[in-house]
Image (cartoon, helix red, strand yellow):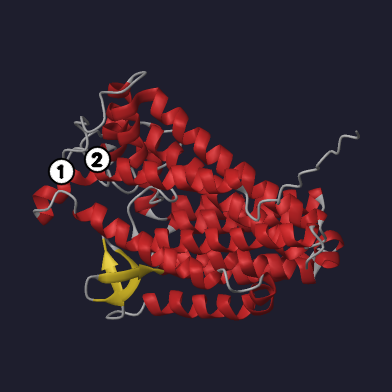
Amino acid sequence: MRSSSVTQVSTPALYDKWFVFAIFCIIAFGLLMMTSASIVISDQVMHQPFYFLYKQIIFLTVGLGVMVVMLQFDTKFWEAYGGHFLLFVMFLLALVLIPGIGHVRNGSARWLGIGPFGFQVSELTKFMVVIYMSGFLVRHNEEIRYSLIGFIKPMLVLTVIAMLLLREPDFGATVVVITTALGLMFLAGMRLRNFIFLFSVVLFSLVTLAVSAPYRMARLTSFLNPWEHPFDKGYQLTQSLIAFGRGGWSGVGLGNSIQKMFYLPEAHTDFLFAVIAEELGIVGMVAVLGLFSLLVYRIFHIGKMAQLLNRPFAGLVAYGFGLWIAIQFIVSIGVNSGLLPTKGLTLPLMSYGGSSILVSCMMIALLLRIDHENRLTALGIR
């Protein structure tokens, strides 16, 4: 009697499980900590302790709807129309600066909208710059690799965008956009000497801009020695550092932060990481760092697979999103911990903010689409 063996063939997954896991954990953890950080100010100002939580859930729900729509579009669609979308975003950036159309909050004109509902155009700019730059670098790859004019062309476009962002003003978004674009150029194969030259020019320009405006110079000086003016220019950073000091190894406990009780400004947005440090200590900080590291690693893995499958545009888009997330969360954590000057940057997918959440959902949808197409291509279906 012969024994027969049955070979079981498992169906390969059509999405990156670790990528989805990292996204889910970051969003869930963000909702928990954002609620904890905002519950006091929400109760005092809105007379509803969970006001910001409810709004964040609404943003996520709308973002989920946007994701469902975006998943229907092939990456070739974004490659074909990336330049058109960027022109539209530049138009919106100019529109924001018109008095009566752009909404001014905290001295900055960054929002478009009707009544209490506004959209921060700079968030959409980050997304569209990655799309545009990826398409440009694929179409002009030879120029980028061997010619000086190859990287001057996109830098002219980025200069216009930077000028519009600085007029709002939004120096933090400008740094993220320019740095992400430079990283994409390097990954696309720009010669090292050209990259070093371009990086030096951009760095000199950003430093010049930083020291030329009095409010930016004040932020730089307060960052270097926040305790010199703890109740004036250094107030935000000193309160954030107090939160870090109170946290210790395991924190004071979830919901037990003192700094969020009107001591630390923007506790549920720009300084959410400081509240995490105070309530959950080093353990909580390591958890956040671990989740974002996993997310960035999986995004770069998606990009690498696209490149190996001869899908250069999709690969560069994934790399660009990975750089964007990495730069923003590093800067946000650096600002909270006093390692970098104060900038208005949130923790991606964690901090409160409708514009940030919606654009992040757009990014997630496109990454899921790229990964799905990678797997179909590897299976020979595409």
Indicate the quadrant containing the C terminus: top left, top right, bottom left or bottom right: bottom right
Element on which disc 2 rests: helix
Q: Is residue 190 visible?
A: no
Question: Residue 320 placed where, x, y %?
Answer: 63, 56
Disc 1 marks which amino acid?
Val
Residue 242 lies left or right of residue 302; in this view the side is left
Residue placed at 52% from the left, 53% from the top?
208
Q: Is residue 2 above or below residue 13?
A: above
Q: Residues within 10 Å of mark 2 (few under 14, many from 20)?
A: many
**Quarter assignment of residue 82:** bottom right
Viewer-proximal residue, 253 or 61?
61
Residue placed at 21% from the left, 38% from the top?
260
Viewer-proximal residue, 306 or 135?
306
Residue 29 lies left or right of residue 324; in this view the side is left
Q: Which mark is residue 36?
A: 2
Q: Is residue 263 above or below residue 115?
A: above
Disc 2 marks which amino acid?
Ser
> Badges 1 and 2: C-beta atoms under 8 Å apart?
no
**Quarter assignment of residue 256:** top left
Instruction: State how far apart marks 1 and 2 are (Cα).
Output: 8 Å
